Image: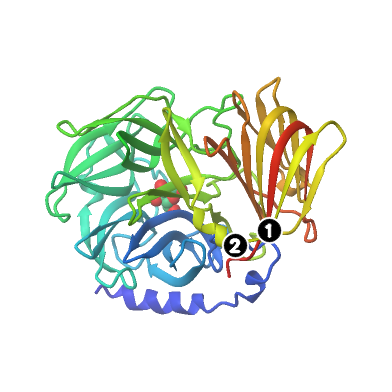
Amino acid sequence: MNPLHDVLQQYYQEQMNMPKETITTHFWRQAFHVEAPMGWLNDPNGALQIDGVYHLYYQYAPHDAAGGIKYWGHMRSDDLVHFKDEGVALYPDQPYDLHGVYSGSAFIENGVIHYFYTGNVKHLGHHDYITSGREQNTIHAISRDNGATIEKQQVVIAAADYPPSMSNHIRDPKVRKINGTYYMVLGARDLADQGQVLVYRSDNLDDWVYHGVFFGPLAHMGYMWECPDFFQLGDQEVLLVSPQGIDAQPHRFQNIYQSGYYLGSVDWETVTFTPDTPFQELDYGFDFYAPQTFTDERGRQILWGWMGLPDAEYENPTVPLGWQHAMTLPRVLEVRSGKLYQQPHENYQVLRDVAVTRELNVTDGTYEYFSGQLQEIIVDIETITELSVQIKGDTNIHFQSEKGLLTLQLNEAGYGRKQRTLQLEQLTGLQLFVDRSSLEVFINQGEYVMTTRMYPDEHEDKVEITGKLTATVTHYSLREAK
Ligand code: FRU
């Protein structure tokens, strides 16, 4: 053990005892989305299911709601609906991860969980963190007690050993086993400021050899690709990446950074990915980034996204209250007709309370109205000219068939954020999840998703539907996942 370790552990323990009561009772605290008990949360990490139990780790800065040095927080769940806070799983307490236990993933073999994460180290005095002044090591850690405790093992790829054509930005490992060989992908930025995915190989999970570039770089696709993920769905290979530095277009790439997918194939001889589709965004709302998937024990691929973004262009009003950010609902992935569909994992249905179904035949001026802090609303559309859904006073979803545009507008509840739009051929259905301070909209059975935080006044609880359409609307009041 290094001498710093004990000192740091004591410091961390003292900090963790800070009072949290005012946080946990605030009316913007989410009722059925994962949040950290205090401070800052970002990427989902190390998601897995073992012996029936789900574990979700996450980027966590408990002492600073505006960000700071990252730990891994840990939540555990029997059903993906109710989560128990298991505290901090990994502290930045070693020379190789001193300025942050950055993002990583889990890989299960023979009952042992192998975690791979990025150890971030800043060299003080240097301000050029791109080519100097920073290390990002790849580290192996294991758990032999189903995720309850994690022991750090060793640096498996030291920053100094990354390919010379790369900058110091190489991070976020994800591992997979194919025909007896382990493959690790890492997000990277090269010295020419181009994002790409690198791949390493191993026969034993300890010794890793650089294989080459798995995919990229591509023109106009940004300077850095974060959080790569790769898996097979049916007969398609799927590659997820979170690129930074793509220029905004009128109805695409509207956030500061993007998250999206390619469907394609992998040649396991050369270990390279070839896409069949262009890059498609995973979400069109204000708050979605750095998703990670895991394969559940039924073989399904489940995705969590960070319901937030780095460098968001607004001042989040929960920061002065002592916390910031949340996770999306866990989503089940499926490939249909050349697209990746996302559906909320069905277990949330245990939260459904009173149900109301209405046949809507709406012309201008009439509306359906539902109230409740926590709601799920399913709109199955038969014919549509126009639709407007007003949520908790100030958040609005609007669709016009003629333009083929779905608009999400935040107004006052956005604290400076205004509008996101999605262009789509037709709108056949919406499924809305209204939590205390977030909205997730699944569009056309999960063909598209729009996710956002919103900050309504305390007693706003109405959802109103107006427009010109014929549809069946089913409304559920939801219970808290407590
Ligand atoms: C993505 C990211 C990762 C990094 C982590 C640090 O949001 O920047 O690339 O590992 O967050 O918290």
Vertical comparison of 196 with 107: above or below = above
Vertical comparison of 282 with 151: above or below = above
**Crowd class of label 1 (few under 14; some 14 to 19; many from 20; radius 10 Å):** many
Q: Position of residue 301 (x, y in %)?
A: 38, 47
Residue 152 quadrant = bottom left
In the rendered structure, which amino acid carries the disc numbered 1?
Leu
Residue drawn at (74%, 49%), measured in percent from left and top?
A: 413
Q: Which residue is mark 2?
A: 351
Lower position in the chain sequence, tag 2 or tag 1: 2
In the rendered structure, which amino acid carries the disc numbered 2?
Leu
Query: Dot 2: what SS?
Result: helix
Query: Dot 1: what SS?
Result: loop
Tell me, yes or no, whether the two marked residues, 2 and 1, touch with CB atoms within 8 Å: yes
Q: Position of residue 434 (x, y in %)?
A: 66, 52
Question: In the picture provided, is 252 more to the left or to the right than 435?
Answer: left
- Circle on res. 374: 1
**Residue furthest right as drawn:** 365
**Crowd class of label 2 (few under 14; some 14 to 19; many from 20; radius 10 Å):** many
Q: Is residue 126 visible?
A: no
Q: Position of residue 194 (x, y in %)?
A: 37, 30
Q: Position of residue 423 (x, y in %)?
A: 61, 26
Which sits in the foreground, 424 or 45? 424
Vertical comparison of 389 with 401: above or below = below
